[in-house]
Image (spheres, rainbow, N blue to C red):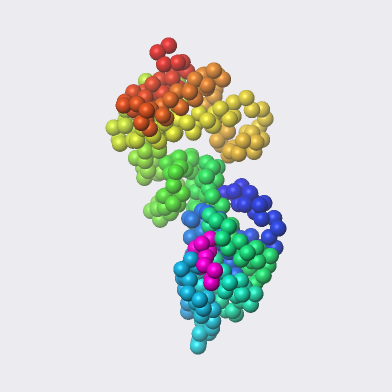
Amino acid sequence: MAAATARSGGKKAAAKIPQLSWRAPEPAPIMLVSGPEEVCAERAMAGVRDYLKAEDPTLEVTDIRADDYTSGTLLGVTSPSLFGEPRLVRVEGVEKCSDAFLSEALAYIEAPQEGATLVLRHTGATVRGKKLLDAIRSGTGGGAEVPCPAIKRDSDRYDFAAGEFKAAGRRVAPKALQALTSAFSDDLTELASACQQLIADVDGDITAEIVARYYGGRVETNAFVVADTAIAGQYGDALIALRHALDSGADPVPLVAAFAMKIRTMARVAGQRGSSRDIAMRVGMKDWQVDRAKRDLQSGWSPRSLGAAIQAIARADAEVKGASRDPVFALERMVTVVATRRPFGA
Protein backbone atom coordinates (compact mmCIF):
# COMPACT_ATOMS: atom_id res chain seq x y z
CA MET A 1 0.00 0.00 0.00
CA ALA A 2 2.85 2.38 0.86
CA ALA A 3 4.38 1.78 -2.55
CA ALA A 4 1.11 2.50 -4.31
CA THR A 5 0.65 5.70 -2.32
CA ALA A 6 4.18 6.78 -3.15
CA ARG A 7 3.54 6.21 -6.84
CA SER A 8 0.35 8.21 -6.70
CA GLY A 9 2.07 10.98 -4.80
CA GLY A 10 4.86 11.01 -7.35
CA LYS A 11 2.42 11.79 -10.15
CA LYS A 12 1.15 14.79 -8.19
CA ALA A 13 4.53 16.20 -7.18
CA ALA A 14 3.31 19.70 -8.11
CA ALA A 15 0.55 19.63 -5.49
CA LYS A 16 1.02 22.32 -2.85
CA ILE A 17 -1.35 20.84 -0.30
CA PRO A 18 -0.77 18.08 2.29
CA GLN A 19 -1.13 14.49 1.08
CA LEU A 20 -2.83 12.57 3.88
CA SER A 21 -3.18 8.87 4.61
CA TRP A 22 -6.68 7.56 4.08
CA ARG A 23 -6.36 5.67 7.38
CA ALA A 24 -6.01 8.81 9.50
CA PRO A 25 -7.05 11.94 7.59
CA GLU A 26 -7.11 15.13 9.66
CA PRO A 27 -9.86 17.48 8.47
CA ALA A 28 -9.15 20.60 6.46
CA PRO A 29 -11.66 23.20 5.19
CA ILE A 30 -11.47 21.62 1.71
CA MET A 31 -10.63 17.94 1.32
CA LEU A 32 -10.12 16.09 -1.95
CA VAL A 33 -10.48 12.30 -1.74
CA SER A 34 -9.02 11.15 -5.06
CA GLY A 35 -8.40 7.86 -6.82
CA PRO A 36 -10.34 4.73 -7.75
CA GLU A 37 -10.06 2.57 -4.60
CA GLU A 38 -13.52 2.84 -3.06
CA VAL A 39 -12.69 0.92 0.13
CA CYS A 40 -9.97 3.42 1.01
CA ALA A 41 -12.10 6.39 -0.01
CA GLU A 42 -14.99 5.23 2.19
CA ARG A 43 -12.60 4.80 5.12
CA ALA A 44 -11.19 8.28 4.55
CA MET A 45 -14.61 9.93 4.47
CA ALA A 46 -15.76 8.01 7.53
CA GLY A 47 -12.53 8.94 9.30
CA VAL A 48 -13.14 12.65 8.69
CA ARG A 49 -16.68 12.33 10.03
CA ASP A 50 -15.54 10.46 13.15
CA TYR A 51 -12.78 13.01 13.80
CA LEU A 52 -15.18 15.94 13.60
CA LYS A 53 -17.90 14.12 15.55
CA ALA A 54 -15.45 13.46 18.39
CA GLU A 55 -14.63 17.17 18.50
CA ASP A 56 -18.29 18.22 18.50
CA PRO A 57 -21.19 15.74 18.72
CA THR A 58 -23.56 18.36 17.26
CA LEU A 59 -21.87 18.01 13.86
CA GLU A 60 -24.30 18.35 10.94
CA VAL A 61 -23.56 15.91 8.09
CA THR A 62 -24.94 16.50 4.60
CA ASP A 63 -24.42 14.32 1.51
CA ILE A 64 -24.93 15.69 -2.00
CA ARG A 65 -24.10 14.56 -5.51
CA ALA A 66 -22.14 16.68 -7.93
CA ASP A 67 -23.75 15.04 -10.97
CA ASP A 68 -27.33 15.64 -9.79
CA TYR A 69 -26.90 19.10 -8.38
CA THR A 70 -29.36 21.91 -7.70
CA SER A 71 -27.93 25.40 -7.94
CA GLY A 72 -27.40 27.08 -4.58
CA THR A 73 -27.22 23.82 -2.59
CA LEU A 74 -23.54 24.04 -1.74
CA LEU A 75 -23.76 27.49 -0.22
CA GLY A 76 -26.96 26.57 1.60
CA VAL A 77 -25.58 23.46 3.34
CA THR A 78 -22.26 25.06 4.29
CA SER A 79 -23.70 28.28 5.72
CA PRO A 80 -23.80 28.60 9.53
CA SER A 81 -27.03 27.61 11.24
CA LEU A 82 -28.74 29.57 13.99
CA PHE A 83 -26.79 27.72 16.69
CA GLY A 84 -23.50 27.61 14.79
CA GLU A 85 -23.00 23.83 14.72
CA PRO A 86 -20.01 22.57 12.69
CA ARG A 87 -20.94 21.28 9.24
CA LEU A 88 -19.55 18.39 7.20
CA VAL A 89 -20.58 18.29 3.55
CA ARG A 90 -19.65 15.20 1.53
CA VAL A 91 -19.88 15.40 -2.24
CA GLU A 92 -19.88 12.25 -4.38
CA GLY A 93 -19.57 12.03 -8.16
CA VAL A 94 -17.24 14.99 -8.73
CA GLU A 95 -15.80 13.13 -11.75
CA LYS A 96 -19.28 13.55 -13.31
CA CYS A 97 -20.09 16.97 -11.91
CA SER A 98 -22.60 19.31 -13.54
CA ASP A 99 -21.62 22.72 -14.84
CA ALA A 100 -23.60 24.34 -12.02
CA PHE A 101 -21.71 22.42 -9.35
CA LEU A 102 -18.33 23.08 -10.95
CA SER A 103 -19.00 26.81 -11.10
CA GLU A 104 -20.23 27.05 -7.52
CA ALA A 105 -17.49 24.80 -6.12
CA LEU A 106 -14.79 26.92 -7.76
CA ALA A 107 -16.33 30.02 -6.20
CA TYR A 108 -16.72 28.30 -2.81
CA ILE A 109 -13.09 27.23 -2.41
CA GLU A 110 -12.03 30.83 -2.90
CA ALA A 111 -13.84 31.69 0.36
CA PRO A 112 -14.79 28.58 2.42
CA GLN A 113 -17.40 29.00 5.13
CA GLU A 114 -16.05 29.09 8.67
CA GLY A 115 -16.91 25.94 10.61
CA ALA A 116 -17.59 23.91 7.46
CA THR A 117 -15.62 20.98 6.09
CA LEU A 118 -16.17 20.17 2.43
CA VAL A 119 -15.10 16.68 1.26
CA LEU A 120 -15.01 16.14 -2.50
CA ARG A 121 -14.86 12.60 -3.89
CA HIS A 122 -13.28 12.23 -7.35
CA THR A 123 -12.56 8.70 -8.59
CA GLY A 124 -10.28 9.80 -11.41
CA ALA A 125 -12.45 7.90 -13.89
CA THR A 126 -12.73 11.04 -16.06
CA VAL A 127 -11.01 14.41 -16.41
CA ARG A 128 -14.27 16.14 -15.62
CA GLY A 129 -13.72 18.66 -12.83
CA LYS A 130 -9.97 18.96 -13.52
CA LYS A 131 -10.11 22.73 -13.13
CA LEU A 132 -11.53 22.28 -9.64
CA LEU A 133 -8.94 19.65 -8.70
CA ASP A 134 -6.09 21.81 -9.98
CA ALA A 135 -7.36 24.77 -7.97
CA ILE A 136 -7.57 22.71 -4.78
CA ARG A 137 -4.11 21.22 -5.33
CA SER A 138 -2.66 24.68 -5.87
CA GLY A 139 -3.58 25.54 -2.30
CA THR A 140 -6.77 27.50 -2.90
CA GLY A 141 -9.03 27.19 0.12
CA GLY A 142 -6.41 25.69 2.43
CA GLY A 143 -7.16 22.16 1.32
CA ALA A 144 -5.68 18.69 1.74
CA GLU A 145 -5.75 15.61 -0.47
CA VAL A 146 -6.30 11.99 0.47
CA PRO A 147 -4.99 9.79 -2.39
CA CYS A 148 -6.73 6.41 -2.79
CA PRO A 149 -4.80 4.71 -5.63
CA ALA A 150 -5.88 1.32 -6.96
CA ILE A 151 -4.65 -1.68 -4.97
CA LYS A 152 -3.86 -4.34 -7.55
CA ARG A 153 -0.52 -5.95 -6.76
CA ASP A 154 -0.16 -8.81 -4.29
CA SER A 155 2.29 -6.76 -2.26
CA ASP A 156 -0.19 -3.88 -2.00
CA ARG A 157 -2.99 -6.19 -0.82
CA TYR A 158 -0.61 -7.70 1.74
CA ASP A 159 0.27 -4.22 3.03
CA PHE A 160 -3.42 -3.30 3.11
CA ALA A 161 -4.31 -6.32 5.25
CA ALA A 162 -1.31 -5.72 7.53
CA GLY A 163 -2.49 -2.13 7.97
CA GLU A 164 -5.96 -3.29 9.01
CA PHE A 165 -4.54 -5.25 11.93
CA LYS A 166 -1.97 -2.61 12.84
CA ALA A 167 -4.66 0.07 12.97
CA ALA A 168 -6.62 -2.14 15.39
CA GLY A 169 -3.54 -2.76 17.53
CA ARG A 170 -3.58 -6.48 16.77
CA ARG A 171 -0.73 -8.83 15.96
CA VAL A 172 -1.02 -11.09 12.92
CA ALA A 173 1.36 -13.78 11.69
CA PRO A 174 2.91 -13.30 8.22
CA LYS A 175 1.51 -16.67 7.10
CA ALA A 176 -1.94 -15.56 8.21
CA LEU A 177 -1.61 -12.42 6.09
CA GLN A 178 -0.47 -14.51 3.13
CA ALA A 179 -3.44 -16.83 3.51
CA LEU A 180 -5.88 -13.92 3.75
CA THR A 181 -4.52 -12.08 0.71
CA SER A 182 -4.58 -15.34 -1.27
CA ALA A 183 -8.12 -16.15 -0.19
CA PHE A 184 -9.43 -12.71 -1.18
CA SER A 185 -7.10 -11.89 -4.06
CA ASP A 186 -9.84 -10.54 -6.33
CA ASP A 187 -11.94 -8.38 -4.01
CA LEU A 188 -10.48 -5.74 -1.68
CA THR A 189 -13.87 -5.13 -0.06
CA GLU A 190 -14.11 -8.77 0.97
CA LEU A 191 -10.50 -8.74 2.18
CA ALA A 192 -11.25 -5.70 4.36
CA SER A 193 -14.40 -7.38 5.72
CA ALA A 194 -12.48 -10.57 6.50
CA CYS A 195 -9.83 -8.65 8.40
CA GLN A 196 -12.46 -6.77 10.41
CA GLN A 197 -14.32 -9.98 11.21
CA LEU A 198 -11.15 -11.57 12.58
CA ILE A 199 -10.39 -8.44 14.61
CA ALA A 200 -13.88 -8.50 16.09
CA ASP A 201 -14.21 -12.24 16.70
CA VAL A 202 -10.75 -13.42 17.72
CA ASP A 203 -8.99 -12.69 21.00
CA GLY A 204 -5.21 -12.59 20.90
CA ASP A 205 -2.91 -12.99 17.92
CA ILE A 206 -4.23 -13.90 14.48
CA THR A 207 -2.54 -17.08 13.26
CA ALA A 208 -2.59 -19.00 9.99
CA GLU A 209 -4.61 -21.73 11.72
CA ILE A 210 -7.30 -19.22 12.69
CA VAL A 211 -7.48 -17.89 9.14
CA ALA A 212 -7.78 -21.46 7.80
CA ARG A 213 -10.59 -22.17 10.27
CA TYR A 214 -12.54 -19.09 9.18
CA TYR A 215 -11.80 -19.02 5.46
CA GLY A 216 -10.36 -22.39 4.53
CA GLY A 217 -13.40 -23.05 2.37
CA ARG A 218 -12.66 -20.16 0.05
CA VAL A 219 -12.18 -21.36 -3.52
CA GLU A 220 -8.99 -19.35 -3.88
CA THR A 221 -7.49 -20.88 -0.75
CA ASN A 222 -8.20 -24.40 -2.01
CA ALA A 223 -6.71 -23.40 -5.34
CA PHE A 224 -3.45 -22.35 -3.75
CA VAL A 225 -3.24 -25.60 -1.81
CA VAL A 226 -3.46 -27.49 -5.11
CA ALA A 227 -0.91 -25.22 -6.75
CA ASP A 228 1.56 -25.42 -3.86
CA THR A 229 1.38 -29.21 -3.81
CA ALA A 230 1.90 -29.54 -7.57
CA ILE A 231 4.74 -27.01 -7.64
CA ALA A 232 6.47 -28.97 -4.87
CA GLY A 233 6.45 -32.01 -7.19
CA GLN A 234 4.01 -34.06 -5.11
CA TYR A 235 2.07 -35.48 -8.03
CA GLY A 236 -0.25 -37.90 -6.22
CA ASP A 237 -1.04 -35.47 -3.43
CA ALA A 238 -1.68 -32.72 -5.98
CA LEU A 239 -4.29 -34.83 -7.79
CA ILE A 240 -5.94 -35.66 -4.45
CA ALA A 241 -5.96 -31.96 -3.51
CA LEU A 242 -7.47 -31.12 -6.91
CA ARG A 243 -10.26 -33.64 -6.42
CA HIS A 244 -10.93 -32.34 -2.92
CA ALA A 245 -11.12 -28.76 -4.20
CA LEU A 246 -13.51 -29.71 -7.00
CA ASP A 247 -15.68 -31.75 -4.61
CA SER A 248 -15.81 -28.69 -2.34
CA GLY A 249 -17.29 -26.65 -5.16
CA ALA A 250 -14.15 -24.96 -6.49
CA ASP A 251 -14.51 -23.25 -9.86
CA PRO A 252 -11.89 -24.36 -12.43
CA VAL A 253 -11.14 -20.78 -13.51
CA PRO A 254 -9.65 -19.55 -10.19
CA LEU A 255 -7.85 -22.88 -9.84
CA VAL A 256 -5.96 -22.16 -13.06
CA ALA A 257 -5.47 -18.55 -11.97
CA ALA A 258 -3.74 -19.72 -8.77
CA PHE A 259 -1.29 -21.80 -10.81
CA ALA A 260 -0.70 -18.90 -13.19
CA MET A 261 0.01 -16.46 -10.36
CA LYS A 262 2.56 -18.71 -8.65
CA ILE A 263 4.34 -19.90 -11.79
CA ARG A 264 4.47 -16.34 -13.12
CA THR A 265 6.11 -15.23 -9.86
CA MET A 266 8.65 -18.04 -10.09
CA ALA A 267 9.45 -17.12 -13.69
CA ARG A 268 10.05 -13.48 -12.71
CA VAL A 269 12.43 -14.49 -9.92
CA ALA A 270 14.26 -17.24 -11.84
CA GLY A 271 17.69 -16.08 -12.98
CA GLN A 272 17.63 -12.95 -10.81
CA ARG A 273 20.76 -12.23 -8.79
CA GLY A 274 21.08 -10.43 -5.49
CA SER A 275 19.36 -10.45 -2.12
CA SER A 276 15.65 -11.04 -1.77
CA ARG A 277 15.20 -7.37 -0.90
CA ASP A 278 17.06 -6.25 -4.04
CA ILE A 279 15.11 -8.66 -6.25
CA ALA A 280 11.82 -7.61 -4.64
CA MET A 281 12.52 -3.97 -5.42
CA ARG A 282 13.40 -4.76 -9.04
CA VAL A 283 10.35 -6.91 -9.79
CA GLY A 284 7.79 -5.15 -7.56
CA MET A 285 7.19 -7.85 -4.95
CA LYS A 286 7.48 -8.32 -1.21
CA ASP A 287 10.59 -9.96 0.25
CA TRP A 288 8.58 -12.98 1.42
CA GLN A 289 7.19 -13.52 -2.08
CA VAL A 290 10.71 -13.65 -3.49
CA ASP A 291 11.81 -16.03 -0.72
CA ARG A 292 8.85 -18.30 -1.45
CA ALA A 293 9.55 -18.28 -5.19
CA LYS A 294 13.19 -19.15 -4.54
CA ARG A 295 12.16 -22.11 -2.38
CA ASP A 296 9.69 -23.27 -5.02
CA LEU A 297 12.33 -23.07 -7.73
CA GLN A 298 14.62 -25.34 -5.73
CA SER A 299 12.19 -28.26 -6.03
CA GLY A 300 13.43 -29.45 -9.42
CA TRP A 301 12.55 -26.53 -11.67
CA SER A 302 14.51 -25.49 -14.77
CA PRO A 303 13.91 -22.89 -17.49
CA ARG A 304 12.60 -25.68 -19.73
CA SER A 305 10.14 -27.05 -17.17
CA LEU A 306 8.97 -23.53 -16.31
CA GLY A 307 8.29 -22.90 -19.98
CA ALA A 308 6.34 -26.16 -20.27
CA ALA A 309 4.30 -25.26 -17.19
CA ILE A 310 3.47 -21.82 -18.55
CA GLN A 311 2.27 -23.36 -21.81
CA ALA A 312 0.19 -25.98 -19.97
CA ILE A 313 -1.42 -23.31 -17.78
CA ALA A 314 -2.23 -21.13 -20.78
CA ARG A 315 -3.87 -24.10 -22.50
CA ALA A 316 -5.83 -25.01 -19.38
CA ASP A 317 -6.96 -21.40 -18.97
CA ALA A 318 -8.47 -21.41 -22.46
CA GLU A 319 -10.06 -24.82 -21.98
CA VAL A 320 -11.75 -24.09 -18.64
CA LYS A 321 -13.16 -20.89 -20.15
CA GLY A 322 -14.99 -22.75 -22.90
CA ALA A 323 -12.45 -24.15 -25.35
CA SER A 324 -12.99 -27.69 -24.03
CA ARG A 325 -15.99 -29.73 -22.98
CA ASP A 326 -14.03 -31.38 -20.17
CA PRO A 327 -12.56 -28.77 -17.80
CA VAL A 328 -11.71 -31.42 -15.20
CA PHE A 329 -9.44 -33.24 -17.65
CA ALA A 330 -7.86 -29.91 -18.56
CA LEU A 331 -7.08 -29.32 -14.88
CA GLU A 332 -5.68 -32.82 -14.41
CA ARG A 333 -3.40 -32.40 -17.43
CA MET A 334 -2.15 -29.05 -16.11
CA VAL A 335 -1.47 -30.52 -12.65
CA THR A 336 0.39 -33.43 -14.25
CA VAL A 337 2.69 -31.19 -16.27
CA VAL A 338 3.42 -28.93 -13.30
CA ALA A 339 3.93 -31.71 -10.76
CA THR A 340 6.04 -34.02 -12.98
CA ARG A 341 7.98 -31.23 -14.77
CA ARG A 342 7.36 -33.13 -18.02
CA PRO A 343 5.05 -32.75 -21.02
CA PHE A 344 1.74 -34.56 -20.63
CA GLY A 345 2.05 -38.24 -21.53
CA ALA A 346 5.86 -38.22 -21.56
Residue 48 visible, this angle: no
Residue 315: where, in percent of width, then height? 43, 25
Report whether residue 107 is seen.
yes
205 vs 306, nearest the viewer: 306
226 vs 162: above or below? above
Q: Is residue 318 left or right of residue 4?
A: left
Compared to residue 104, the image places residue 316 above or below, namely: above
Q: Position of residue 106 (x, y in %)?
A: 61, 71
Instruction: Give the x, y percent position of residue 289.
Output: 55, 35
Image point 43% across, 20% down: which residue? 337
- Kindly identify the residue that appears in the image at 64 percent across and 38 percent down: 281
Task: Determine if the magenta segment contains residue 125.
Answer: no
Q: On the rendered image, what quadrant is the C terminus found in?
A: top left
Number of marks present in the image shown: 0
Outermost residue, top direction? 346
For image coordinates 54% across by 22% down, the residue present is: 298
Q: Left or right: 243 with respect to 254?
A: left
Magenta residues, start to end: 91-101
- Residue closest to the eye, 228 or 250: 250
**Does 287 sit left or right of 205 as displayed?**
right
Find the residue positioned furthest to the front.
Answer: 99
